[in-house]
Image (cartoon, grey):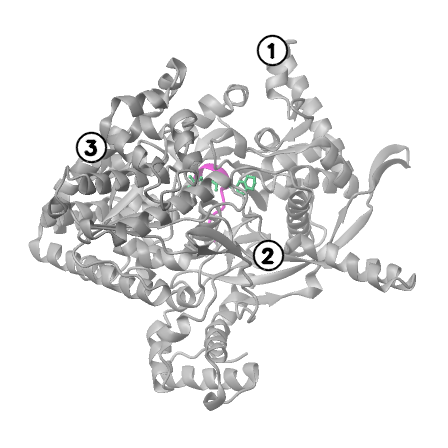
Amino acid sequence: MTSPPRTVDGFVRQFLENLNLVRGVPLSASSDNDRYQALAHTVRDYLMARWLEDLRRQREAQGKGVCYLSAEYLLGRQLDNNLLATGLTEIATEAMASCGIDIDELRGHEVEPGLGNGGLGRLAACFIDSLATMGVPNIGYGIRYEYGIFRQTFVDGQQVEQPDAWLALGSPWEFPHPEAAQTVSFGGHTETYDDAGVTRTRWVPGWNVQALPYNYMVPGYHNGRVNTLRLWSARATDAFDLRIFNSGDYAEAVRAQTFAENISKVLYPEDSTPQGKELRLQQQYFFVAASIKDFLDTVLPKDFDLTRLPERVIFQLNDTHPVIGVPELMRVLVDERGLEWDAAWDITRECFAYTCHTLLPEALEEWPVDLLGRLLPRHLEIIYRINDDFLDEVRARYGDDEMRIRNMSIIAEHPERSVRMAYLATVAGAKVNGVAELHSQLLREKVLPAFNEFFPGKFTNVTNGVTPRRFVRLANPELSELITSALGTGWLTDLERLRELEVYAEDPDFRTAFGEIKADNKRRLSAVLAARDGVEVSDGHMLDVMVKRLHEYKRQMLKLLHIVTQYEAIISGKVAAADVQPRTFIFGAKAAPGYAMAKRIIHLINAVGQVVNNDPRVEGRLKVIFPPNYNVTLAERVIPAADLSEQISLAGKEASGTGNMKFALNGALTIGTDDGANVEIRELVGDDNFFLFGMSEPEVEALWARGYKPAEFYQRDPQLRSAIDLIASGAFSGGDRSVFEPVVSNLLYDDRFMVLADYATYIGAQAKVDAAYADQDAWTRSAILNVARCGFFSSDRSMRDYIDRIWHTPPVL
Ligand code: 26V
């Protein structure tokens, strides 16, 4: 074991040694990638001793741990995070400088592992950061996709996807453990056999793949703790290869290998419409089966009494993606470990808990019975048995109420026979939670009301959170320093302490310092965008930001209509450009490759930007910037620079949002609907420090019930009409009216997310934003209060809530 480099000299020595021994080059001949890799190795060497120590400690403690099962982890860059966690940032910076290397330069060489789509994957990354920081035993289990979320580029303003080859130069942060590989089976059939007078079932699979684990360190902040993220990679089994090789068919053997390796090849970039793809179900079962086996066989002691499993583990299901783990654990317990069904079911029901992350009915996963039965025949049988037993209980309670039985059945009959994964998770889970107060309420009342009635006490809420280490300390170092100068240290792991900043909101010097930091952050962002995309944030502009996946329910169109409205007012002479509050609008958004409307909206945003940014009549007072490939790395630059955070989904559609929390914690004010965690943000920061607009969820429901006719809003509101007419006229498509016609007719005749209904109040709220921004000092005061009052949104608090209400997993000290 190399000794940890606690001094600059020690760090330099270790770094040079890593350059030589790991990269095989001297400093003088090293490339940037060599240097980045050697630096990363130096940091990981330092963490290594702690990691091993933690594993030993956790093994000895024999306590209960959290197995977080998630198909996605959107980690972001690792180097800075790990330097921060270990307290090595200054030492490393000086050490690099003494070698003539600019550490900032090296930072830029890390390709972020984008192993997630958006909020759900980033949440998983925040949660494992918090668990490590709190010293709670945790393994994050997931998939090591060879290609993460696609790299987005624009060609003529339209999204073009490029593969994300994040491993091309190798990742210094991963540790392959081929010796801990697991076999995962698929296909085949089931058969019964006699086992000393007892009839048992066994699964005779059709084919196997190997699951190879790669471990990643998850360091706690300044506490010497290191948890593990274990991601699985698929390989063909030797036996499988060999059999075909021996038959002399080389091409067939290679095909088999490709077939197996496809399982972990690429992250599915859809995050709302399940396509029922076989490969996706293979991915889900692949990682869940490997993880459960890994936990039972390698983490638990040999000969562990499985009836005590709930004392040692909770498997947290991050949405429905890992729910196939429920029948898998039943299969292992009953078929492989010989437990009675009822005993196995009692264990299983205590070992799983389920988090739902959506309200969109189309995002609730269902697997066709045909497909599931072909791929996992034994699991389908088990699901049927779980459902039969469950429906018997329902009948015992309510009698033969056929409507109720149909509504609650885990098996849907229409439009095709399929398994409702959310229902399976709800029946099996010890607890079911939503991710913000409003979301959990709608889950209980609208999505799963029959289950809420049937299982009193099962449903609960845990409002999401974000890690302040990455999203305040790393993203906003100057603000962090200002906070520390006011509060001292300790707030980064006790974020409610930000409350103590409230008094500083009244201190003019503090406000000045806070305002200067915001201006610095804007300059830093401008430099990043200039280098990256050749665009700049104009001086003196308010920075108005909407960054998130492109979805109709999130309503990027509403933001765009505001921009077009302002532009139209200028060019039609209704408003003098000089009277317009200067604003730069930043968008960041990827569209699922198959989501045509989302892609059209991206095209339209770019087209509007092209016209508005180049029209001299605007006098530079409005500017639209849409940097391609929004990701965690860019988020860390954009969020601290923002003045205004756009959280404008239709009420009742956004489960929580977590970007909303990141902005508020970095001193942006929110313009938002009463949706998701916006509700809680507004309650905490106060109405005076939040720009609320739009219908509430009950108002949305009422309007639907009355019959929503978007064209009527268009007819009634001249401002809205002018904006839509301008788009329809071809003004943003070189006179060609056909290009954006589908967007326009969608708004007028099929406006599912009620953009037009909320337009007027949105424009009204934006006018209030302009007026408020004119008083910079008052704005800064509000921004400080946002920071001071949002400590609740630390993911440490989310983790405490999960621990207290669901997991019951104390820290190991
Ligand atoms: C759903 C699906 C559906 C099947 C096809 C593939 C796929 C992939 C990902 C997802 C996840 C969608 C759910 C999701 O990301 N929800 C977001 O979760 C955030 C964290 O709780 C929350 O802040 C957002 O409001 C919510 O949209």
Element under disc 3: helix
Which amino acid, mark 1? Tyr
Span highlighted in magenta in the image? 804-811
Measured as percent of width and height from the top left, residue 392 is found at 68, 18
Which amino acid, mark 3? Gly
Task: Identify which residue is drawn at 49% across, 71% down.
Answer: 44
In terms of sequence position, does the residue under pointer 2 or pointer 3 come before the other?
2
**Answer yes or no: do the residues labelled 2 and 3 have beta carbons within 8 Å?**
no
38 lies left or right of 789: right
Mark 1 and ligand 1: say if the CB distance to the nearest ligand atom is below 8 Å. no
Residue 39 lies, with reference to residue 399, above or below; the image says: below
Front residue of this view, candidates 625 and 81: 625
Pointer 1 residue:
398
Whether 694 is among the magenta residues is no
Pointer 2 residue:
145
In terms of sequence position, does the residue under pointer 2 or pointer 1 come before the other?
2
Measured as percent of width and height from the top left, residue 300 is found at 65, 53
Q: Quadrant of residue 727?
A: top left
Mark 2 and ligand 1: say if the CB distance to the nearest ligand atom is below 8 Å. no
221 lies left or right of 291: left
Pointer 3 residue:
764
